[in-house]
Image (cartoon, rainbow, N blue to C red):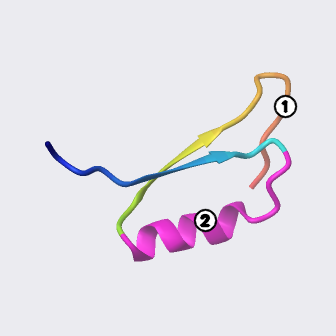
């Protein structure tokens, strides 16, 4: 079985999205941002 590492992030009110992306890239880990369809994401 293959070990797959991912970070799952609930981003509706997450203030550290940029930092999560940076750490994921540094450690070669996939990131999945999950948000409510009723919220609008900003960079």
How far from the left and from the top, in percent, is residue 6?
Answer: 43, 51
Circle 1 Cα neighbour tier, 10 Å, few/some/many (<14 / 14–19 / ≥20)? few
Dot 1 or dot 2: first in sequence order is 2
Residue located beneath label 2 in the image? 20
Is 29 in the magenta?
Answer: no
Q: Quadrant of residue 10?
A: top right
Q: At numbered mark 1, what does the secondary structure look like: helix, strand or loop?
A: loop
How far from the left and from the top, in percent, is residue 27?
Answer: 39, 73
The residue sitting at 84% across, 31% down in the picture is 39
In-image side of 1 versus 14 (left or right): left
Report the Cα–Cα distance between label 1 and label 2: 19 Å
- Confirm or deny contact between disc 1 and disc 2 (CB under 8 A): no
Quadrant where the C terminus sits is bottom right
Is 25 in the magenta?
Answer: yes
Magenta stretch, main secondary structure class? helix
Q: At numbered mark 2, what does the secondary structure look like: helix, strand or loop?
A: helix
How far from the left and from the top, in percent, is residue 22?
Answer: 55, 72
Chain part drawn in magenta:
13-27
Residue located beneath label 1 in the image? 39
Taking depth in this image into account, of 34 and 2 the one nearest to the observer is 2
In-image side of 17 versus 21 (left or right): right
The residue sitting at 36% across, 54% down in the picture is 5
Q: Is residue 27 above or below residue 6?
A: below
Q: How many marks?
A: 2
In this view, which residue lies farthest toward the left? 1
The residue sitting at 76% across, 22% down in the picture is 37
């Amino acid at each position: 079985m293959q070990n797959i590492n991912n970070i799952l992030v609930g981003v509706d009110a997450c203030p550290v999205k940029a930092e999560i992306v940076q750490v994921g890239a540094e450690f070669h880990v996939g990131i999945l941002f999950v948000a409510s369809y009723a919220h609008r994401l900003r960079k």
